[in-house]
Amino acid sequence: MASINRRVLPGFSLTLGYTVFYLSILVLIPIAACFLKASTLSFHEFWDAVWTERARAAYYLTFGAAFIAALVNLVLGLLLAWVLVRYTFPGKKIVDSLVDLPLALPTAVGGLVYASLYVQKGWLGQYLAPLGIRGAYTRLGIVLVLTFVGLPFVVRTVQPILEDLDPESEEAAASLGSTRWQTFRNVILPTLYPALITGFALAFARGIGEYGSVVFVSGNMPYKTEIAPILIVARLEEFAYGEATAIAIVLLVISFVMLVLINRLERWSMRHEY
Amino acid sequence: MKSSLRLPFFVITLGLMIGIFLSISTAQQEVSLLNVSYDPTRELWRDINSHFIPLYEKQKGVKLTINQSHGGSSTQARAVIDGLEADVTTLASFLDTDAISKKGLIKDGWVERLPNHSRPYYSTVVFVVRKGNPKGIKDWPDLVNKPDISIITPNPKTSGNGYVSFFAAWGSVVVRGGSRQDAINYVTKLYQRVPVLDSGARGATTTFVQKEIGDVHLAWENEAHLEVAEAKGKLELVNPPISILAEPQVAVVDANVDRAPGHREAAEAYLKYTYTDEAQEIFAKHFYRPSNETILKKYTDVFPANTKLFPITAIAKDWPDAHKQFIGDGGVFDSIYKPRGR
């Protein structure tokens, strides 16, 4: 009759209770407040606030730029993690700490620095402008800063997995006649998929929410370089709290759906690891 | 033995009681005010506070501390609405103070509680141009008629400087007799020449000064003076013949000053002080136009008398109406950027 607790360590209910409490205070209650505020609008008002042509252009840009930046980080982050784990070179510790810097730096500073580097008279801009590349006040600029703020995520998720990777499997693959590329492609990469996807999701989510750096580098031109968070600020400026939260809700819902899908993908890749 | 022990106890207890009593009575004479203001006024209010605090202590025997809070004007207004315990607000625009009032924190009719529509000082929008004014920008029509001019002004949707500049541009057409359609054409051309819409006044200044983008910067008059001074000869200030009368108003926050004794009295005295000659001089020194005409005239080298400043009522019913018509969702500003053919 009595149920047998098969767990080795006790404390399930305690930790679950704590988790729910913690999550509620930090995440669920603020989000619920958001929904509550938006619910002061009628459906019609809500729709008018969130589905204008200008807002659609902003969503498209926000998610598109965050997605591209996360993709870039996926490739470059893997490369960076690889170099940091597999090789030793002078100054490696410093490079390793540099990776986290975008998290510590106020992002507004990042945005300002990028903008002043890439404007036509800037250090980099003066060479790029003749080539027709404009890195400030364009969509490219937005992708650049989002790549910057999202840099640590892929590196930091992939790094520990790479470190724990058993060199024996690589040796076995080599001794069985696999080429270097085949070893990387068929032995190493599959074990990294879950970490890569997690890192991608984190960088992507970070990019969607980013405001501070983007406003300085994007130029905020409606329909062209205006991200969705700018619309929220614009509505707040009119003291239209309801409409502002309505846009936030749309961002939240789309982000949530995307993150759930990415999580699914990660689970799927874990099951198909070998 | 026992009685000799009791005496020190008695003395100590008495001493403590006197001490507590004294500290309570001095506490009653200490008032700490919070002045919630906007970004560029930090030095201005520090200057005014340093003159007002000793004066108030001498007159009323109250030891006053005045804390200042600065940020974007409408962000500050939202902070007060959300519960920041401001005793007085000294914000950049009628709209911001009005928003607080609409939430019931400042009583109706606040505008008429202090002289000159609760406006101890005022300001306007001027042009900042590169050294020697190479493009010859003198007046509003130059901005759209001269070839190859690029204009820096922040986003009217997110910045007070932004929408006041928009109103100034609009008024430069209609106050001079142009039609609504003329004004629409004018602002459309003007904003097509704006390469970057920074989210706030500070961002626009950085774009213009540090990144050297643009030929003319539509700036708050007081900030323009600082900008030109800091650029050490690389920039010049141009006063257009016509511009807007911006109304930075001050108000006592009724809902907050009655929470503790002494606050209302001190807050009201503080704002009244801003109308004295001494305070009016301080405004002028910080490049804000004093409302006192006599003192304003002493500074004609800074505030040229031939600039015509039109009130908001020249272009709309009032500030909220102007914001709704021109800047709000679906307003004139939105139509400028709407892609053609859709």
Image (spheres, coloured by chain):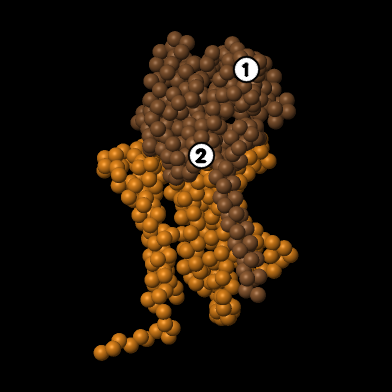
Chain colours: A orange, B brown
Return the residue nearer the eye: A6 or A274.
A6
Disc 1 marks a residue whose amino acid type is: Ile
| Residue B263: assigned label | 2
Horizontal and vertical percent position of residue B80:
46, 41
Kind of residue at badge 2 = His
B77 above or below B322? below
Position of residue B262 relative to residue A71, above or below, is above
Q: Position of residue B311 (x, y in %)?
A: 47, 18
Q: CA distance from mark 1 to mark 2?
A: 30 Å
Residue A114 seen in the current view: no
Q: Which chain does tag 1 point to?
A: B
From the image, tell me which residue sits under label 1. Answer: B295
Quarter containing the N terminus of chain B: bottom right
Q: Secondary structure at mark 2?
A: helix
Q: Residues within 10 Å of mark 1 (few under 14, many from 20)?
A: some
Q: Earlier in the sequence, mark 1 or mark 2?
A: 2
Residue A222 is situated, as x and y percent measured from the top left of the image, at 45, 35
- Please state if B228 lies on the left or on the right of B86 as rendered: right
Relative placement, left or right, of B219 versus A48 is right
Q: Nearer the viewer, residue A11 or B236?
A: A11
